[in-house]
Amino acid sequence: MRQQSQLALLDKRRFLPFFLTQFLGAFNDNLYKNCLLLMAAFAAAENLPLNSDLYINLAAGLFILPFFLFSSAAGQICDKYEKSMIIRRVKLLEIVTMVVASGFIITQNYLILLVLLFLMGVQSAFFGPVKYAIIPQHLNENELIGGNALVEMGTFVAILSGTLGAGILIEQTDATAWVAVSVVLFAVLGYLASLFIPGAAAADPDLKINWNLFQQTLTIIRKTRSNDSVHKSIIAISWFWALGAAYLTQLPNLASETLKGSPQVVSVMLAIFIIGVAAGSLFCGRLSKGHIEPGIVPIGALGLSLFGIDLYFAVTPATTTNLLTIDAFMENSENLRVLLDLGMIGFFSGLFIVPLYAMVQQRTPANRRAQTIAALNVQNALYMVVSALSGMVFLGFLELSIEQFFLTLGVLNLLICALIFRKVPEFIERFVARFVKKVASD
């Protein structure tokens, strides 16, 4: 499928309303979460129920926790019932949660806002399986790569927009009022977009839901192992999210502490990384020409490691004690190399992740596709928690610098992807057949 037809999906009713719904949902999640974290960071100590650092880390954990608790139920419900109806009910839950939250944002009741952040995590956990399970029902097989590319692009742009939007809102004179109105407004817009999503029939209406969620999670994870390419794709996707979480978590400290960049520099670095992901996702659709091409994954893996390793050599700690403006930061050519590396890490992330999601969708039986995505979401959450703990070990206990941590990640990515490709030779075989032989013949 050509790039033009990939973007043309945004003109189609079977895709555009869903795309807008998931974009607005991801945007609002990050807007609310980051506004809450910023409010807590600058709040007076007596207004917080806990120490500021503990509160912020607890907030991050409470947002991830629902993916462990409710993903298996979400996957079963998504396979059993019509999917557009599930999406609309999830969006209604978001509206209710944000309406309640708006009052507590204005009164700055940080304890209740934590509970409501947990509820936002719940609605995200229920939206996750339906988000990827509905795509194959509304798109043709030759549109799967293009659809997934647009969804990944939209997700990362929404994360960036929500993060930057939170910073803008918090700087306003009547910040709490702006935040309260905004989170409700975007929840309502997301629901309105969901009203136009076409129906998607239940994949397994006779499914009996197992409410023993822990048992069901283990069961569906075991079932994914029946197809080795799906199982290893899930591991690769989860590793990607762990890797991405590590980069995004450490970028602010790299910018401010090592490179002495101002908050605006942090925003620029984050923006370049995420724009790179968006560009890579779209280019993947062009490169694959509408086919689900496993051979693109090794290209993404290699690029991730090469530019991740180069980032170690590109970072030169600043000697100044003053925070650098964007102009002053850009005057140093070594910092431009850092920005290039971040953009290329993002770009090859897009090449890496888009074919993997499409492979999971295509090669999973329709009657348990949503449950497989749910199992994937559980593993994603687990890997991201391990990623956070690893950062604490490497940067705290082992006292590595941030750039040394990034070097470690680049090398680990090579080793882990090599193991995955060895277990599923199809990735390398398709890479050789599609790209190496073509170059040789040319």
Image (spheres, helix red, strand yellow):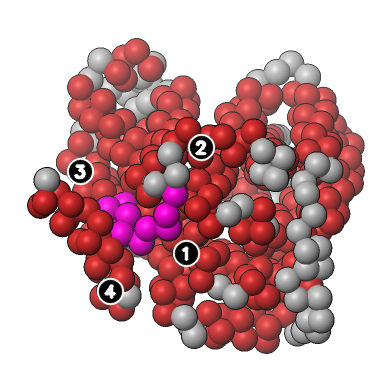
Residue shown at 20%/61% (left/top)?
432
Lower sequence index among marks 3 and 2: 2
The disc at residue 107 is none
- The amino acid at mark 4 is Pro
Callouts 3 and 2 close, C-beta under 8 Å: no
- The amino acid at mark 2 is Ser
Pointer 2 local density, CA inside 10 Å: few below 14, some 14–19, many at least 20: some
Q: Which residue is mark 4?
A: 425
Pointer 4 local density, CA inside 10 Å: few below 14, some 14–19, many at least 20: few
Front of the two marks 4 and 2: 2
Q: Secondary structure at mark 2?
A: helix
Callouts 3 and 1 close, C-beta under 8 Å: no
State the separation of the CA atoms marked 3 and 4. 28 Å
In the image, residue 211 above or below residue 273: below
Is residue 47 left or right of 42 when viewed as pictured?
A: right
- The amino acid at mark 1 is Met
Lower sequence index among marks 3 and 1: 3
Callouts 1 and 4 close, C-beta under 8 Å: no
Callouts 2 and 1 close, C-beta under 8 Å: no
Is residue 37 left or right of 405 when viewed as pictured?
A: right
Q: Secondary structure at mark 3?
A: helix
Residue 294 occupies quadrant: bottom left
State the separation of the CA atoms marked 3 and 2. 35 Å
Foreground of the two, 26 or 360: 360
Foreground of the two, 285 or 171: 285
State the separation of the CA atoms marked 2 and 1. 20 Å
The disc at residue 359 is 1
Residue 100 is at least partly visible in this image: yes
Residue 374 occupies quadrant: bottom right
Q: Which residue is mark 2?
A: 5
Residue shown at 32%/23% (left/top)?
321
> Residue 378 colored magenta?
no
